[in-house]
Structure formats: C-alpha cells, structure tokens
Amino acid sequence: MAEGSIDKTSQDLAKKAEEKGISTAYKRREQMKACPIGAQGMCCKHCNMGPCRITPKNPTGICGATGDTIAARNFARMVAAGTAAHSDHSREVALTLLHAARGEAKDYEVKDEKKLAKVATDFGIETRGKETNKLAEEVAQAALTQFTQQEGELAFIKRAPKKRQEIWKKLGIIPRGIDREIVELIHRTTIGVDQDMESLILSSMRTSLANGWGSSMLATDIQDILFGTPKPLKSKVNLGVLKDDQVNIVVHGHNPLLSDMVATISEEKDMIEKAKKKGAKGINLAGICCTANEILMRRGVPIAGHFQQQELAITTGAVDAMVVDVQCVMNSLPDVAKCFHTEVITTAPQAEIRGATHIPFDEHKAKDIARQIVEKAINNYSNRKDVNIPKDSTDLVAGFSHEAINYMLGGSFRSSYRPLNDNIMNGRIQGVAGVVGCNLPVENPDEMHVELVKELIGNDVLVIQSGCSAIACAKHGLLTPEAASKYAGPGLKEVCEAVGIPPVLHTGACVDNSRILIEAASIVKEGGLGEDISDVPAAGACPEWMSEKAIAIGQYFVASGVYTVFSPEIQIQGSPNLEKFLFQEVEKLTGGKWDVALTSKDIAAKMIDHIKKKRKALGIDKEKERVLYDMAMRRELEV
Ligand code: SF4
Ligand code: MSK
C-alpha cells in the first residue's frame, strides 16, 4: 500500500502487520504475479485434453475452441457462479420464512406485514382474510417454487417496465426457474456444448436476470419481511468502532439470518452481565462486508470495515470473535488470528475453513447457537494481549430502501418518485448513478470509489450505493447529509438539503442491488423519463470489482438496459470480438452495455457522458415544458 493512501487506518494497520511478519492480502498481492493468460480470459481447463492456453501461436484449444468461445465460456461461468452464490443465500432465507411461518423456526417471525402483503400480491396470492403466518407460508412456498420451476417466467419479471419485458421476450432471455438457468449455463459451458460466443452471452444474461429479478430480489424482500424494511438511520463506520473495554464481536459474510440473531443475543441482559463478570463494560457488535450492511440498514449496527479490512480487523488485537457465514471470507483469517487471540468461528454448513472453530448454524435453534457464539466471544475477552484500535470512525446515514426513498421524497400520503423525476427533468439532478462493488488490495484503498462518487455528485448526479463500495465511501464521509453542501453540485445540493438526504444513498448489501432495479423501474413508472430503464439518464459502475458475484450483477444491469462501467479489466481482453460485443453491439439488443475504465476520472466521465446522451434523447438537455402523465398513461407503463 502506498504511503499517503487516503485510507490511513488500513495503511497503518497493514504496515504494522508487515512489521510483525503477518501476511495480509496487501502483501500477498505484491508477491503474486497474475497469470497473463488467465487475466485475458484465454485459459481453458474444461476438459482433460487441456488445460489449453490460447496465444497468437496457438489460437485454438485442442478441441478447436476459439479464443472467443473460451472467453465467453469463462465469462458465463462467472455469471453462473455469482448467481449461484446469491441464490443459495436466497433459498436459505426463503426456507427460514417457511419454517418460521410453520412455527418450526421459533426465533424468527414476520416483522414487516406490509411487505409480506406486497410480495404476496406480486406472487398473485390472495391476501384478504389470511392470518399472517398462513400468508407467510404461502409466500415462502411461492418463493421456493421460483428456484425449482422448469417452465414459464419468474414472477418478479413483471416488476420490470412493460417495454423491458418485451425486449427480454424478443431476445428469449426471460428466466424460467432460478436453478434451471444456473444448471443450463454450466452445462452450456462444458466441452462440446454451446460454442457460439453470442449465444453463450445471451444465455448468461438469462441466468443473470434469474439473479437480479429473481434470487437477489427474493432475498431482499424476504429479509425485509423477516427483519424489517430499512428506514434511514445513523451509525458509524471504520475500525475505530471497536471498543477496548467491551467484548468485540465482528460478524462477517452475507446472510442476516445469523448476524441479526447475534445482534439480538448480544443485547440480552444475561449476556451483558456475563461480559461484565469477565471485566468488560458490555458487548460491542460490528460488521464486515455485506452482512454488516444488512444489520446496519435495519439496526444501525456500526460497520468495522469492508472486504479488504477483514484481516486488518483481527490485527487490532481487539476482536474477541470473528463470526463468519458465506461469501467473501478470506481463507487467511485463522492464520492471521493465530498471532492474536481472536476466535474465528465459521457457521455455514457449506463453508468451513481449516483452523477455524465450526459451529454450524441451524435456524431451528438460532438463538441457542447465537448464544453459544456470543459466550465464546465473552470467554475470550480476557485472552487479549496487544490491543491497537485505530481512532478513526466516521458518521453515516444508511437505510435507503426503495420504500424509504419513496417516503422521503413524497411523504406518507403521497409517497412517490415524482419529486425525483421532476428534478431530473428540470436538470437540478442530471441523472442517477448506481455505484456498487468490492475492494481490491490496491495501492490506494478506497480512492477509486471515493473520487468517482465525488465527481458524480459534483456533477449533480444522485448516487445510489451498495456493498463494500458504500462502506468505502461512508468511511470518507460521503454518506452524510453534510456531504451535499461539501461535494454536491448546486442542483443536487438544493434537492438534498430540501429533502434532508445525503447525496449518496446507501441501499444495502450485494443482494440489495435488486433494490436499484426496483428504483430504476419506479422512475420509469413515475413517467416523463421514457418508457424503459434504458431511457432513464442513469448509469452504473463497479470499481475494484473482486467477486464473480460482481460480474453476475454487472450482467443483469446490462441485460436490464443499464450502461455499466467496471474497473479494472474484466478478463476478456484476449477476445477482441467478445469485447466488441459486450462493449458495443449488445447495446442494440438490450439498450445497456459493458464498459471498462481504469481511473475514477475516466469512469465518471464515461457515466456523465452517457447520462447527457440520455438527457438529450429525452429532450431534457435544455429547458422544456414537461409532459404530465395521467392515470391512463401511467397504467400503460405499469411496472
Ligand atoms: Fe482445451 Fe477444449 Fe478441453 Fe478447453 S475444452 S481444455 S480448449 S480441449
Ligand atoms: S461483500 S461481493 S466484497 S461488495 Fe458483498 Fe463486498 Fe463485493 Fe463481497
């Protein structure tokens, strides 16, 4: 990590870790030389005639597969893997809703009946006169059918604007069932099956839509039902949220089934008393990565850090237990923990790490297991040795679900996106940007996220964020209402100050990128900004993408009509044909397209250019009287 990095907290801790001979991702990245063939998407090991490395000298694999086929297959497999990750998570929350409704998972209950009724209606389930648990059982069963159904269309496809649905229909990419699309895509990419680059990419779009408008959307909705739909709230972020006089439990991973329960148990009087008996003043819960976002959004639990801070959190010597479930958990954690007292506890039946303590989570005994975990942390408090908690923590405001945005903009009697659309049309807000994504062990951590977002809001673009990108920006004060007066352009600043919102709205975890889809669809439904998502002056970005999930998310945004810029490169450079297809030609099919840029300035410039292009196409690039939509016109655009 470079001296003078904007993330001073991480820089200091990484340096100290290195001095102590502790290996972190920052160090390992310096030592690792990326495979140039793999980086270009030109390595295939799909059969045992290979592995084949495609180079100018060897332009095809032994089976004759071209670089285009191999790059497309590798890309498609990333989409399948990313979709599988979100789907397995989603299935688990759907099963928990089912078990809770039947009284078998007694520690969970329906917390948001309004959301339950909304989801039931979208599934076509009659809600009138039904007792809550009966309705929840029917909703859970309908949700689970989305995974296993073999024919037809996923239910939430209907939430997209009509025109978008027609585009998907014409392209033949409406997902039939979540599991089917993942399985079919993996099948297509095995040796001797689908060898046509475009066919593979379209098929991967169908799978990605089964993620965005399927499993991720189901996860978001069911989590809202079980844990409550987020509303704006204040909290803090960065490693300074750890406390030297309290038992620190850090939850890390993705699934709130565990983290929400650990949050409940750490507030229990008994547990706090036990902590006090061990000499601590109380129990302090904090989060890392997306499960942190889940409990931040609904409970205001502070965030210790993002993906690249998981090892650094342990090096503070103050984490008594790091409790992990699935996804984005580094294999190295038990090794880092060996140098401190931290107990790394794995909990997911599908994710164990050698060297960690495994306490399998079971939603039927959720509180008991959470108690066992919290007690382990309490008992470990007295084993702390060298404690070095950085001072830094920053205020933030989070909790901007689609429902919260609707309410903030329109109030409880007339919740609507009308004020947002009006402000986009009158040019105070130039457009909307979704900035999502992960973190890489780069020289200057957070810099790309922060500078990109500053550039966007400075140009009057409202930013919606999720995942670790939101955490990076929160650390630098961008998720506060005050950021509007400091960094936003005059129009956006005026709107933010009038409504009392930050210029950067935190919408949740990776699965909650589905909220951004709903927000985009709601803008279309509100009227005046075109008939489809691709008409809206909007763009997406994924700086420092890391996980295969990011590629799956990028693909569903592109398939939904969004211009989406990734950074760094997306491992397809070995195939100029595939680059041309994804970066240019696909726009004629879906209205969205991929792009890559290597600096925050270039990403922002590309997004702003695109937003300007869309404003021009809508005729709102200059002062113009707006068209007021009447009810009949809105019904036409029903989303
Ligand atoms: Fe090589 Fe073809 Fe086998 Fe891939 S599928 S490893 S390109 S022979
Ligand atoms: S946790 S997928 S590093 S956002 Fe969702 Fe963060 Fe990316 Fe993991």
Image (cartoon, grey):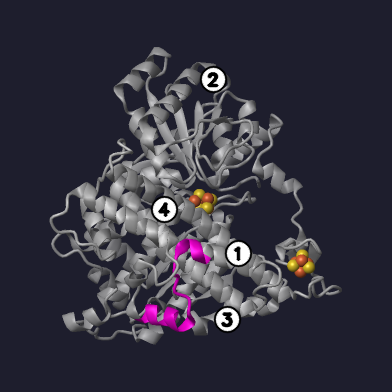
Magenta stretch, overall SS? helix
Q: Relative to 258, say whether 619 is above or below.
A: below
Eye-nearest disc, 1 or 2: 1
Q: Amino acid at mark 4?
A: Leu
Number of numbered discs overlaid on the protein picture: 4
Q: Which label sits on residue 186?
A: 1
Q: CA distance from mark 4 to mark 1?
A: 40 Å
> Which residue is the site of mark 3?
584
Element type where label 1 sits in the image: helix
Dot 1 or dot 2: first in sequence order is 1
- Choose top left, top right, bottom left or bottom right for residue 329: top right
Q: Position of residue 478 (x, y in %)?
A: 41, 53
Q: CA distance from mark 2 to mark 4?
A: 34 Å
Magenta residue span:
163-181
Residue 384 is marked as: 2
Q: Which mark is residue 279?
A: none
